[in-house]
Image (tube, rainbow, N blue to C red):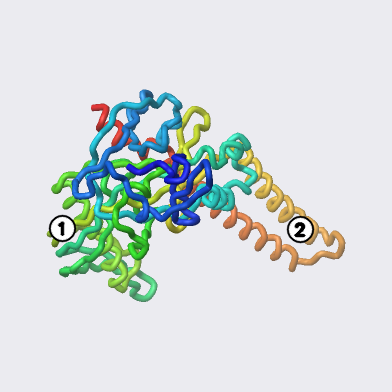
Amino acid sequence: MAVSCRNCAGRLIFNPASQKLECATCGSSFRPEDVEDKNADLQSKYYDTRVYTCSHCGAQVVTSDTESSTFCVYCGNPAIVFDRVSKEYRPDGLVPFQITKEQAIKYIRLRFLKNPIVPKEIKEKCVPENLRGIYIPYWIVNADYTEADYIRGEVKRGKSKEIKYYSRAGNVKFRNIPIDGSNILNDDISRKLEPFYLEDAREFDEDYLNGFYSNTSDLDYFDLRASTAYRCHKLFEDEVVKSVKAQNVKVLDSVYWADIQDDPVYMMMPVWFFTFKFEGKPYTVLVNGQTGKVVGTMPWQKKKVYTIAISVFALVLGLSAFLVWASLNKFLGLTSFYTQGSAAILCGGSLFFAKGLFGIKRILNNLKLTQSEAIFKFVKKRQG
C-alpha cells in the first residue's frame, strides 16, 4: 500500500474534506488515483492488511500501515494488540468518507449533548480523538423476489369494528439492495444507518483506507441469500400494510423467497464509531460517514429525568387544584369557567405526562440498541 509522501516520505492520510491523501509532515496532497504503489499487485483478488485483536472482547479490526489501533472500537478497552498481517479479499468499490471526524462530533453534539440530562462525563469524552472511522462491508444485490401474505385488519361498521382477513401476493425485481456484509452490526443498526448513495462510489483503492479501520465480509452465499430474502421481505411487507384499507393491520403469516441475480457487488461503506463506557457498560454511537446521519442515543441521568417529570406533573396538579378551590370559593372572583379550565389543564397535563413516559420507553429501547452488546454478535461468534 502506498503510504509515503513522494516529496518527504511522510505519512499519507485520506482527508474526507478534500477527498485527497494529505501528508502529515509537509502538507502535500495527492489524489488517491495519482499515487502509485510499486509493490501492489492490482490484478490480485487480495490486498495486504494488518489485523488487531482486542484481548478483552475478542473483536478484530483491520488497519492500513498508517493506522495503529490504540483502543477497541467495539468495547472501548485499550487492551488491543497487533495480531498478524493478513490478505483480505479486494472489494469491487467503496464510498469514501465525506464527513470529517470534526463534523461527526458536531453532529453528535447537536443531536445529544445540549440536553442537560446527558451525564457530564460523557460530554467530556465526546472529542475527535475518541472517534474511529471504519469501512463496513456491504453487498449490493439484485434479486427476483416472490412473497405471499395472510393479513388481519379492522374495519369500522358504525360504532363497532369488524375483523377482516386479506391476502396479498406478488413478484418484485429488486435492484441495488444493500446487505450488511458481516456480523459487526445487526440488521436494525445497519438499516438505521442507511441510505448510502452509490453515486459517490469509487473503484476500490487501498489508499482510501489510509487513516481508517475496516472490516471484511464473513457471509457465505447462503447467509447472503438469507439476508437478502429477509431484507426484501421487510420492504415488501411495508408496502403490503399500506395497501390494506383497514386499521391495526397485521401480517399474520408470510411465505417468501429470493433468487440472487447477477454477481453481487462487494462494497465498503464509511461509518464513524464513537465508543465510550458509562457505569461499566460500553456504548457505541454511529455516524454515517457519507451523510452525517447519527444512529444511537445517550445514557441519561435517570434521577434527574424522573425528578423533572414528577415536579412538572405536581405543578400541573397543584395549579389545577388551586383553580378548582378558588372558583368554588369565589376566591379572587373566579367562576366555574376556571373550574372547567383547571380540568382541561389537568387532562392536558396528564396526557403530556403519559406521552413523556412513552417517550422515555422509546429512548430506553434505543439505548439498548446503542449498548455495544448489539454489535458484539460477531465477537462471540469468533471467540467460539
Helix, strand, or loop for circle 1?
strand
The vertical placement of 318 against 76, above or below, is: below
Residue drawn at x 37%, y 62% is 200
Which label is found at residue 263?
A: 1
Q: Is residue 79 left or right of residue 60?
A: right
Q: Is residue 172 left or right of residue 38?
A: left
Of mark 2 and mark 1, the one earlier in the sequence is: 1
Q: Is residue 66 left or right of residue 333?
A: left
The foreground one among 358 and 50 is: 50
Mark 2 vs 1: CB contact within 8 A: no
Report the quarter where the N terminus lies.
Answer: top left
Q: Callout 2: few (<14), some (14-19), or many (20+) C-alpha neighbours within 10 Å? A: many
The foreground one among 69 and 264 is: 69
The foreground one among 254 and 272 is: 272
Q: Quadrant of residue 183?
A: top left
Q: Which residue is mark 2?
A: 323
Q: Amino acid at mark 2?
A: Leu
Mark 2 to mark 1 CA distance (whole Å):
72 Å
Report the quarter where the C terminus lies.
Answer: top left
Q: Quadrant of residue 259?
A: bottom left
